[in-house]
Image: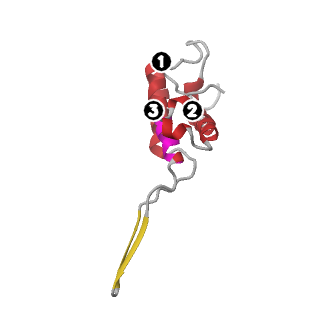
Amino acid sequence: MTEIITAADLPTAIQSHESVDLMVDGANAKASRVAPCLTWTGTPDTEPVPTADQLAEAKLILVGAVKRWAETGAGAFQSQTAGPFGVTVDTRQRSGYNLWPSEIEGLQEICRAIGFVGAGRAFEIDTMPAD
């Protein structure tokens, strides 16, 4: 698997997280599944290769996702009651180890900029009769 990010790309505080290698491998795998053009190394004729700027943008998206995953559970849960009134504030971060839709869209936009047009081909239906 081609790596888009490595543990060294993450902030120092996150590099020491106990599951950082697992999260980095998962982020790379998820990115290569939703935006396969980011891991291409073929010839530009058959597989347009991403530029350094496009890979830097993809790294930024994935570093943000891994940072969010590492900070899961951070925040506070507060509950106050005064007579019949009560307020509960929950600022804990909860997240599965998934990319947010906005992150997926960002990675797929990079592929569109590269010239990858394969997305959606599996769902096209040809309604014209064959000659």
- The residue at 54%/18% (across/down) is 49
Main SS, magenta residues: helix
Q: For this rendering, which residue is in front, 26 or 17? A: 17
Crowding near the residue tagged with mark 3, few <14, some 14–19, many ≥20 C-alpha atoms within 10 Å: some
| Marked residue nearer the N-terminal end (2 or 3) | 2
The mark that comes first in sequence, 1 or 2, is: 2
- Tell me, yes or no, whether the highlighted magenta stretch contains residue 51: no
> Which segment did they paint magenta?
60-69
Q: Which numbered tag is attached to residue 60?
A: 3
Type of amino acid at the residue the image marks with label 1: Thr
Q: Which of marks 1 and 3 is nearer the N terminus?
A: 1
Magenta stretch containing residue 64, yes or no?
A: yes
Please identify the quarter of the rendering in which residue 120 is found.
top right
Residue 7 in the image: above or below residue 75: above
Mark pair 2, 3: CA separation: 13 Å
Of badges 1 and 2, the one in the foreground is: 2
Q: Name the residue tied to disc 2.
A: 7
| Amino acid on which disc 3 is placed | Leu
Query: In the picture provided, is 131 more to the left or to the right than 60?
Result: right
Front residue (pair 88, 40): 88
Cα distance in 3D space between marks 1 and 2:
21 Å
Residue highlighted by disc 1 = 51
Instruction: Identify which residue is drawn at 58% across, 48% down.
Output: 97
Position in image of residue 45 (x %, y %): 57, 12
Q: What element does badge 2 sit on?
A: helix
| 121 over 55 or under it: above or below | below
Q: Is residue 129 left or right of residue 8?
A: right
Image coords of residue 75 (percent x, y):
44, 58
Up the image or down, 124 lies above or below 38; here it is below
Kind of residue at badge 2:
Ala
Secondary structure, mark 1, is loop
> Around disc 2, counting alpha carbons within 10 Å, would you say few (fewer than 14), some (14 to 19), or many (20 or more)?
some
